[in-house]
Image (cartoon, rainbow, N blue to C red):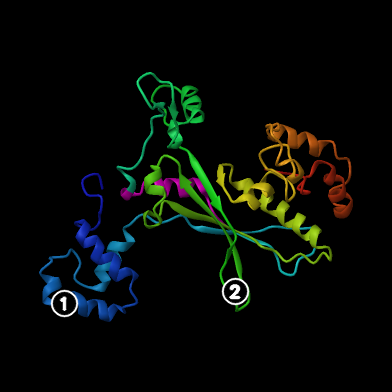
Amino acid sequence: RKDNLFYPFASKEEWEVADYLLHSSLSMAAIDKFLKLCMIQNLQLSFSNARELRSHAEMLPSRPSCKCQTIPSIHPTKLPIHLFWRDPVECLESLFSNPLFHDKLDFIPRRVYKTAARLLRVYSEWLTGDSAWDMQSQYPRGATILGTVLSSDKTNITTMTGARITHPLLLGLANIRMRTCMKLSSKAFMLTALLPIPAYLHPNQWMRGMLEDHLVHECLLIHTMLHIVDTLEAAMLACVRGKTSPFMMASYLRFGDHFRHPTRTRVITLAQLASITVDPNDLEAYFEACAEHRLNGVYAPI
């Protein structure tokens, strides 16, 4: 593979033919018939029938396997709660070893400035930030850091036929250049989990929402990486209620203030949660106690 990125196929052109056939709906007999065409035989492919093509494909590195985990809950649900996930380390290894990214990876933190006077700092890639620079300085010479990114958003699969919803969790490698990551065709993100969307049987809608938020935090305990989310999910992960900033200590009534509010940090949120003495299993009472701090009721955040 060091000499040929498309091994076990002889070239990129041969890989493209194989990729098309493997993803097509053609039967093995139809593939055999296709490969016997004179024009195709002139390509001198390393496989001459569907069986040989399949044996080549089985030599390719396998993708991370999917696991299923049942999550117990003391609160009744319509159906059992199942979390489908892949090992995030295996997903990162798969992305890191992908030959399509071999020339699109960076490993050295750097500080970029607009001019030689170094008056204006430029932040673009993850490795141009201070966090990557600080982490690298803590490791011995020759060590390499890899950044990870999680991205999630609830997605409607069907609207008119059952209103099916899924909650995919995607994982990416921050060392891959942003220009490549932003292209959908590059497939720089890998599905690492399908977060469950349970149907809790609690009669109170607010309590059902609180239980769903807590479940997401419980599922994300297997992933501890930078997370890309929209505003609603950012508030859920920050453990704050709606109309409350997940980044500042301000609610919607203070959004128009002409000064900067203090930053909401993990330490502040954990201190607010620690000050609540109500049993979290008493959903209504705990949710009411969280209202003072504009928290959403998640008692064990990631």
* Residue behind mark 1: 36
Q: Residue at x 43, y 37 (%)?
A: 125
* Highlighted magenta segment, given as a residue range: 85-100
* Residue behind mark 2: 159
Amino acid under disc 1: Lys
Q: Main secondary structure of the magenta part?
A: helix
Circle 2 SS class: loop
Amino acid under disc 2: Thr
Q: Quadrant of the C terminus?
A: top right
Q: Residue at x 63, y 49 (%)?
A: 220
Count residues near mark 2 (Cα–Cα under 10 Å), then give few for <14, some for 14-19, many for 20+. few
**Residue 298 shown left or right of residue 280 in the figure:** left
Rendered position, 266 above or below 240: above
Q: Position of residue 238 (x, y in %)?
A: 68, 43
Q: Can you tell which quarter of the image residue 256 is in? A: top right
Q: Position of residue 78 (x, y in %)?
A: 74, 70
**Disc sitting over residue 219 in the figure:** none
Q: How many labels were placed on the picture?
A: 2
Rendered position, 210 above or below 274: below
Circle 1 SS class: loop
Q: Is residue 289 magenta?
A: no
Considering only order in the chain, which callout, 2 or 1, is on the residue closer to the N terminus? 1
